Image (spheres, helix red, strand yellow):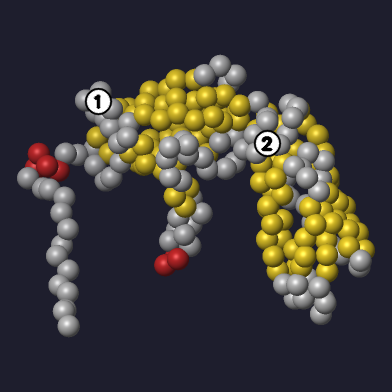
Amino acid sequence: MEISAPVGPLIWPLKHKVDLPIIFTNELDSLINVDLQAPGARQREYLEILPHETRGYFLRCVPQAVGKRSQQIRLSSRIGSARISFPVEVRATARLNVTIFDENGKTTAARVYLTGADGFAHAPPNSFLRVVSGDYEQPFSGDGYFHAEGLFGLELVEGTTVVEIVKGFEYEPLRRELIVKKTPEACSLQLKRLVNMSDKGWYSGEYPHPCERH
């Protein structure tokens, strides 16, 4: 039985659910039952891995104390046992509120890429986090973003949060590093307009696609 740890320390939010991805591969010709134990996990888990099966599983943990520590995971089965430990830093969370303005000082909708201090993409609870797929050789596969109507707020771990805002081709992309602290943080970001194509007589539209009917 072999087990490998994550690369680098993980940053977890205090008293929030954390789903730790684990991948199991059974290279045997027979079924095995795995006993999975981890301090801080919701419960002890027993998993059944079929012959030659690769299976993913999310181990849910809820850290209860701020600070740096070593997280342990123990696996055991009839073929043996294994144990790993990896560094985890648990941080308190705070609320970040952001308002987006256009060149006239009015709130405006935009696409937002937000990366927390934990290194993950985040979106407000009432927004849908979209992830760019790797299909069609897209250059930024894996990037996560959401759409905001002009203002948004969410809970994040303390530390440096990177916010990137884009709004079509007429506005300059905006990138800011914000420090999330214990007290709620309010931030106003204003987009710079590069050109107003409608003032030049150009308007957005869709080219009609002919469709053959049968």
From the viewer's perspective, tell me whether residue 46 is left or right of residue 58: right
From the viewer's perspective, tell me whether residue 20 is left or right of residue 188: right
Helix, strand or loop at disc 1? loop
- Whether residue 99 is visible here, answered yes or no, is yes
Q: Residues within 10 Å of mark 1 (few under 14, many from 20)?
A: few
From the viewer's perspective, tell me whether residue 82 is left or right of residue 162: right
Q: Residue at x 83, y 65 (%)?
A: 33
Mark closer to the observer (2, 1): 2
Could you say where residue 92 lies in the image, as x and y percent from the top left? 65, 26
- Amino acid type of the residue that numbered disc 1 sits on in the rendered structure: Lys
Q: Quadrant of the N terminus?
A: bottom right
Considering every residue shown, the one lying at the far bottom of the view is 214
Q: In this orientation, which residue lies closer to the viewer: 55 or 165?
A: 55
Label located before the other in sequence (2 or 1): 2
Could you say where residue 189 lies in the image, as x and y percent from the top left? 37, 27
Considering every residue shown, the one lying at the far left of the view is 201
The residue at which mark 1 appears reads as 106
The residue at which mark 2 appears reads as 12
Q: Residues within 10 Å of mark 2 (few under 14, many from 20)?
A: many
Q: Quadrant of the C terminus?
A: bottom left
Instruction: Tell me where residue 98 sits by quadrant.
Output: top left
Helix, strand or loop at disc 2? strand
- Amino acid type of the residue that numbered disc 2 sits on in the rendered structure: Trp
- Whether residue 9 is visible here, answered yes or no, is no
Q: In this orientation, which residue lies closer to the viewer: 148 or 50?
A: 50
